[in-house]
Amino acid sequence: MDHPQPLRWLHHGVTTGARIDRDTRLTDSRSGRWPAAALLLVLTWLELVAPERTTLPVLRTAVALFVLVTIAGSLTFRRAWFRDGDPFQVLSRVYGQLAPLARRPDRRLVLRTPVHGPSLLPATRGLLATVSVLLGGTAYDSLSSDIRYAAWVQSTSAPVLLRTATLVATCLVVGLALLLAARVAARPAGVPGRGM
């Protein structure tokens, strides 16, 4: 289902104007959700680490680059980009699967158990990385607000580099923890650990 989104409309306008089939890809690459994970990490860095991140020139540049990357991705991967490459679309789907409320096919609201929604998430490439950045960014946000951490970072000669390294390390630790938990949980069920 196509959701109303200005960048989808722009993609539709460009492909229609250029008479390009909206479903034909320029590449056979199956990158999965890795582009969404990478863009989410960049956006998290911009929100939590980047110097001058609240100034108008930085925000304008970030929005312009995001639009350019999204249009380039959608022209390369076509509509699959919006499903798997757009970080906001992927996060929306992940949050939707984690929500306790859901809609059945007949559109009735239902209450689901905490394990039901996540079990319906399709195991796609990059999903673990996307969730790791989501949770790791949240963990880093909590860590960075600690007064002792902030004072220590400010006392170093390269605070931005240290914050960036801490953000990436936090996401990697969360990713490894999720991978380990998935493999441990998959073992009794006889599910192969590869591809998680």
Image (cartoon, rainbow, N blue to C red):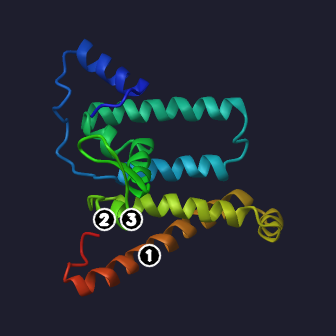
Q: Secondary structure at mark 2?
A: helix
> Residue 74 is drawn in which quadrant?
top left
Drawn side of residue 100 relative to residue 120, left or right: right
Residue type at numbered disc 2: Ser
Q: Position of residue 49 (x, y in %)?
A: 67, 53
- Few, some or many C-alpha atoms within 10 Å of disc 3 (few <14, some 14-19, many ≥20)? few
User: Distance of mark 1 from mark 2, alpha carbons?
Assistant: 19 Å
Q: Is residue 112 above or below residue 115?
A: above
> Residue 168 is drawn in which quadrant?
bottom right
Q: Position of residue 126 (x, y in %)?
A: 34, 58
Q: Position of residue 72 (x, y in %)?
A: 35, 32
Q: Is residue 101 above or below residue 146?
A: above
Residue type at numbered disc 1: Leu
- Few, some or many C-alpha atoms within 10 Å of disc 2 (few <14, some 14-19, many ≥20)? few
Question: What numbered label is drawn on residue 113?
Answer: 3
Q: In this figure, which residue is indicated by the disc labeled 1?
A: 176
| Residue 133 visible, this angle | yes
> Which residue corresponds to the image point at 25% horizontal and 33% vertical from the top-left?
78
Q: Nearer the viewer, mark 1 or mark 2?
A: 2
- Pointer 1 or 3: first along the chain: 3
Residue type at numbered disc 3: Thr
Drawn side of residue 46 relative to residue 72, left or right: right
> Which residue corresponds to the image point at 63% horizontal and 63% vertical from the top-left?
140
**Residue nearer the viewer, 111 or 43:** 111
Quarter containing the C terminus: bottom left
Q: In this figure, which residue is indicated by the disc labeled 2?
A: 119
Which residue reaches farthest bottom?
Answer: 188
- Pointer 3 or 2: first along the chain: 3
User: Distance of mark 3 from mark 2, alpha carbons?
Assistant: 10 Å
